[in-house]
Amino acid sequence: MMQVDDESRRAGVQRALRQFGQLVDNRTFLLTFVRTLEANKYFTMKDRVSFASFLMVALQGKMEYCTEILKTLLYRADRKIPFRKMSSKSFCSRRTGIRS
């Protein structure tokens, strides 16, 4: 009984991951998803880094697509920066240290 439940759960998870992978391949969905995550005030910097890492792993076989997404996100981020208060150098600087 338990083995059947585990197998059906595994099949359901695999199906869900395939469907999510198809959504990630949709440029409009991915950009909207990222924008939604960024708008969430409880989505911490650590969460952002983790999500970005997982996304890069998921898209490693599609680097051209990934590059286009990153260009779009950087362009949008660049448009939001009030240059009077922040230079582009500080925009690109890293504020967190590397922890092991």
Image (cartoon, rainbow, N blue to C red):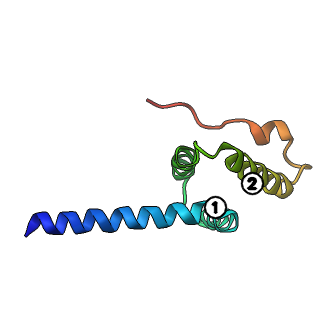
Could you give the CA–CA distance between mark 2 and mark 1, rounded to whole angstroms? 9 Å
Quadrant assignment for the N terminus = bottom left
The answer to whether the residues at label 2 and label 1 have Cβ atoms under 8 Å apart is yes
Query: Residue 95, position in %: x, y?
Result: 65, 37
Q: Which residue is mark 2?
A: 73
Decide if residue 5 is on the left or right side of residue 34.
left
- State the residue at coordinates (87%, 49%): 85
The amino acid type found where label 2 is placed reads: Leu
Asked whether residue 15 is in view, the answer is yes
Asked whether residue 42 is in view, the answer is no
Decide if residue 65 is on the left or right side of residue 88.
left
Tell which residue pokes out farthest to the right in this image: 84
- Sequence-first tag of 2 and 1: 1
Q: Which residue is mark 1?
A: 34
Query: Residue 7, position in %: x, y?
Result: 21, 63
- State the residue at coordinates (17%, 69%): 5
The amino acid type found where label 1 is placed reads: Val
